[in-house]
Amino acid sequence: MTAQTDTQGSVTAVYKVSGMSCGHCEGAVSGEISGIPGVDSVKAVAATGEVTVVSDTPLDEEAVRTAVDEAGFELVGPA
């Protein structure tokens, strides 16, 4: 996972997700990941397959993988 700590104390991580092809896909992935405790914001981009997550602390990759699976997609790994 690529993680970067921002000056405000938050952590930004970028993940690669396969299978997203439209805005609905982006919304499904964003919605599931938003449900992980500590997540402040999520931005999914179907065109690149990248999902950027800002959280209070580094996230457990398995929690992210489970959320992406629940949305019907596959977490490939860090971007």
Image: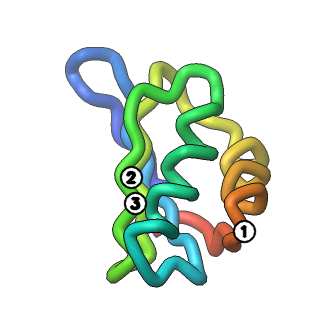
In depth, the one of 25 and 69 nearer the eye is 25
User: Disc 3 and disc 2: Cα gap in Å?
Assistant: 6 Å
> Residue 23 at x, y = what percent?
38, 69
> Residue 19 at x, y = what percent?
59, 82
In this rendering, is residue 50 above or below 27? below
Mark 2 lies on residue: 52
Q: Residue, x 63% and y 22% (percent of image)?
A: 37
Q: Residues within 10 Å of mark 3 (few under 14, many from 20)?
A: many
Three-letter code, disc 3? Ala
Secondary-structure class at tag 2: strand
- The part of the image, by quadrant, that contains residue 28 is bottom right
Three-letter code, disc 1? Gly
In this rendering, is residue 55 above or below 33? above
In depth, the one of 17 and 13 nearer the eye is 17
> Residue 57 at x, y = what percent?
52, 23
* N-term-proximal mark, 2 vs 1: 2
* N-term-proximal mark, 3 vs 1: 3
Three-letter code, disc 2? Thr
Mark 1 lies on residue: 72
In this rendering, is residue 56 above or below 58? above
